[in-house]
Image (cartoon, helix red, strand yellow):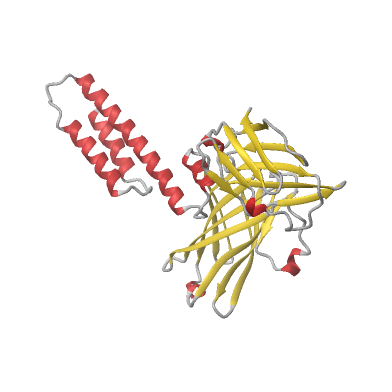
Amino acid sequence: MRYDFEIELSKVLNSECAISDKVRASIDNAYESIRKKNKRKKYFKNTIAAAMCLLMVCAILSNDVIASVIKSFFKFNDKGIETAINNGYINRIESETTNNDISIKLQSYFADSNKIGISFKIKIEDLSLLKGDIEKIYLSYSIIDKNGNYIGQSGYTEEENLNIKKSIISSVEDKFELLDLEKGEVQYDIILESCDSSIPKIEEAVIKVDKVNILYKNNKTSIKGNWTLKLIQNNLEYVKEYNYSALNSIPNIDIVSIKAEPTSLNIIFNVNQVYENKEFPIDNLILIDENGNEYKTNICSMNTNDGKTTISTNFKISSYEEHKLFKLIIPNYGEIKLQKK
């Protein structure tokens, strides 16, 4: 048992995942405490101790790996996304393709009705492309579901967008990081958001990349190709979600739906007034939880019909936080108390 345990522990400590000095010290101390146990103790006690140590190592490593993922993945200052990832709501997959001496690997992703997050690792063989003052590296891509419907796309010019089907995505954020210039490795992360909470299930969806773009200080290079990556769903079968109901009503406001999902809380309501684009003061819409914490949003979608305006938006609150009560403050209209169903 001791020999087997040492082998397993050695495998873990020498795995490719990053382990902080603090965690490694904790593991070493725990292991040494077992090795120094009185050899006269019964065999089964050593077995239990070894098993407990292995469990502790796994737990520590699991938390450390998740924390490392949050640190290096999706640096978008989004508390809802970070909470979801911290609770294991992320797919770690290995989908990779190469074309024109550029390989693109889909490393990890998550998705619910409100947001999609994807992390790519790009490897560029021609290192001369990475010389100079690089301001940004990004992909031109489309996400298409198994039925051929466009979920979202980004990285195209206005002229190119005219030839692409309209998507259901309200906004796109992206970030890149040069990981290793000598190896030509780049990390590229994206967040796609639907204020209407209309992102469908994306298992069996594909990401079609047709350009890798490198933006320098004074010019731009685009490498055209055909990279197709599959979004394979491994561990996101259960979406933790809660619905909320209004405890009171206010004039000229009708709540359509309020639902918390892993990445964010979506609110849809009708206003008995026609607002033109950007007229509604969305920056002043405030959500307050039962602990007095305030949340704001700065993006929404608006649709007008029959003299009413439907407003949809997301707040950076994860369903994993399991809030029971909220207060929604709608500027110029009043307050509505919300309770988890």
Q: Is residue 112 left or right of residue 65?
A: right
Q: Position of residue 278 (x, y in %)?
A: 72, 58
Quadrant containing the C terminus is top right
Q: Position of residue 255 (x, y in %)?
A: 73, 38
Q: Position of residue 121 (x, y in %)?
A: 51, 57
Q: Is residue 188 left or right of residue 332?
A: left
Kindly tell me whether residue 172 is visible in this rendering: yes
Q: Position of residue 133 (x, y in %)?
A: 49, 76
Q: Is residue 59 left or right of residue 137?
A: left
* In the image, residue 133 above or below residue 42: below
Q: Is residue 142 left or right of residue 274?
A: left
Q: Quadrant of residue 287?
A: top right
Quadrant containing the N terminus is top left
Kindly tell me whether residue 231 is visible in this rendering: no
Q: Quadrant of residue 26?
A: top left
Which residue is at a point 59% across and 36% down the rendered structure image?
326
Q: Quadrant of residue 325?
A: top right
Which residue is at a point 64% across and 48% down the rendered structure image?
285
Which residue is at a point 15% across and 28% down the rendered structure image?
37
* In the image, residue 169 above or below residue 256: below
